[in-house]
Image (cartoon, rainbow, N blue to C red):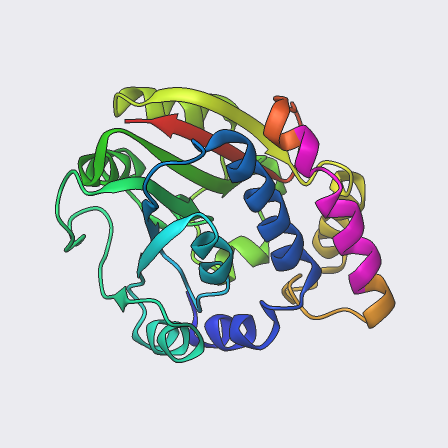
Amino acid sequence: MEREVFDRMADVDLRHWWFVARRRIIARFLEEHLPRGGEPLRILEIGCGTGSNLPMLQAFGVVEAIEPDGGARRIARDRFDVPVRDGMLPDGLDVPDGTYDLIVMLDVLEHVEDDAAALAAVKRKLKPGGRLLLTVPAMPWLWSSHDEAHHHFRRYTAGRLTGALSAARYTIRHHSHFNTLLFPLICAARLAGWITGRRGGDDAMPGALANRVLGAVFASERGWVARRSIGVGVSMLAFAEA
């Protein structure tokens, strides 16, 4: 991603409605789907960015992270007491094979040109029966300047995402769209951007009231996403077993 994108992310990712609500959705999903009791899980977040997900993941086990951008990696290390190492998908994951109970990739796969090779590489790092949780942007027709600024190669359909996981020989345990309730509003905002030619990003920090309302609406989907497969939404989640 562009340097200014990471700088902006570090400034807002602990309080912006989208980041906060996505963490609440992921935490609820993991509470519902991870095994309870036993030894602490060994968890790896690939593409941790500036690190805002790391404290949430620490509630579920011992967390490590990989981030290819040096500036973002330094920010994550400085903010949180988690080891964050350099690495790149698909061929630059300098961690042992067969090590992790859970690997998390939150809006990462769309940044990798060869997503099939990336998923195969990640699978090698999981223990037998280990789980992969990933989120990606959905609906290719929603492509916008946001995707370009974030250096996305694609937005996903459900068929593209589940097909890539199946080709890498994962067993898919759950998949669902999310960010569904705000879908009409986001569509309207993207349409307005196309009509007016506005090139600004849609991740700027809104006012306090709007931030609270948008976050509450988005996060209210967490129970649905954990238990049902929703057919429409701005993003998608998949949970798969090695």
Q: Quadrant of residue 209?
A: bottom right
Between residues 194 and 165, which one lies in front from this camera angle? 165
Measuring 37% from the left and 72% from the top, which residue is drawn there? 81
Image quadrant occupied by the N terminus:
bottom left
Measuring 59% from the left and 35% from the top, which residue is drawn there? 139
Where in the figure is residue 141, as x and y percent of width and height?
60, 37
**Residue 220: in magenta span:** yes
In the figure, 206 relative to 115: above or below? Answer: below
Measuring 40% from the left and 46% from the top, which residue is drawn there? 105
Q: Magenta stretch mostly in which secondary structure?
A: helix
Image quadrant occupied by the C terminus:
top left
Left or right: where 157 falls relative to 118:
right
Where does the magenta region start and end? 211-224
Where in the figure is residue 157, as x and y percent of width and height?
52, 28
Between residues 55 and 50, which one lies in front from this camera angle? 55
Q: In which quarter of the image is residue 164?
A: top left
Where in the figure is residue 21, as x and y percent of width and height?
66, 52
Where in the figure is residue 47, as x and y percent of width and height?
36, 56
* Residue 17 in view, yes or no: yes
Left or right: where 52 falls relative to 24:
left
Between residues 204 and 57, which one lies in front from this camera angle? 57
Left or right: where 40 falls relative to 134:
left
* Residue 46 in view, yes or no: no
